[in-house]
Image (cartoon, helix red, strand yellow):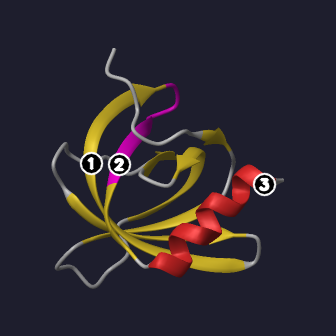
């Protein structure tokens, strides 16, 4: 298995999902783990590998916005999906908010 470049932490945060180039919301979900370089989230909306997404993630009563690429999709029970993404574009202050999860 490929080793991660960034450590991950188990955390549940609300996430709003939009495919880049589309105005409507493509889904809601909840993160299962997160790191400075990416996250995985559970959603009832299927995404495809390589889809480009804009994610709005709630972290400690603030919203982090990232652009991400889907790297894997796993089907799980109840017509839900475990979706893993790599962050492509994230502001420095938003990365700091994610990194603050490791300080708790």
Disc 1 secondary structure class? strand
Q: Earlier in the sequence, mark 2 or mark 3?
A: 2
From the image, state whether disc 3 or disc 1 is nearer to you: 3
**Residue furthest toward the right?**
104
Q: Which residue shows up at 53% across the image and 49% down it?
A: 35
Instruction: State the residue in front, 2 or 14.
Output: 2
Give the magenta-colored segment's residue range. 77-86
Q: Where residue 80 appears, x then y in whole percent? A: 46, 38
Q: Position of residue 61 (x, y in %)?
A: 75, 77
Quarter location, residue 52: bottom left
Nearest the eye: 69 or 104:
104
Q: At x 29% / y 35%, what residue is drawn?
A: 72
Image position of 36 (left or right of 46): right
Left or right: 40 with respect to 54? right
Instruction: Tell me, yes or no, whether the highlighted magenta stretch contains residue 82.
Output: yes
| SS assignment at label 2 | strand
Which residue is disc 1 drawn over? Answer: 70
According to the picture, the residue beneath numbered tag 2 turns out to be 85
Numbered-mark total: 3
Q: Is residue 95 above or below residue 82?
A: below
- In depth, the one of 35 and 26 nearer the eye is 35
Tell me the residue at 49%/55% (across/down).
36
Q: Residues within 10 Å of mark 2 (few under 14, many from 20)?
A: many
Q: Dot 3, how many residues are within 10 Å of its Cα: few (below 14), some (14-19), or many (20+)?
A: few
Q: Nearer the viewer, mark 2 or mark 3?
A: 3
Answer yes or no: do the residues labelled 1 and 2 have beta carbons within 8 Å? yes
Residue 68 in percent (x, y) is at 30, 61
Residue drawn at 20 percent across, 45 percent down: 48
In terms of image quadrants, where is residue 7?
A: top right
């Amino acid at each position: 298995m490929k080793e991660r470049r960034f450590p991950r932490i188990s955390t549940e945060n609300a996430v709003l999902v939009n495919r880049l180039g589309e105005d409507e919301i493509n889904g809601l979900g909840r993160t299962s783990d997160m790191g400075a370089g990416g996250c995985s989230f559970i959603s009832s909306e299927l995404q495809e590998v390589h889809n480009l997404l804009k994610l709005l993630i709630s972290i400690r009563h603030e919203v982090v916005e990232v652009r991400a690429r889907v790297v894997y999709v796993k089907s799980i029970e109840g017509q839900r999906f475990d979706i893993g993404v790599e962050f492509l574009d994230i502001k420095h202050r938003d990365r700091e908010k994610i990194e603050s999860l490791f300080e708790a």
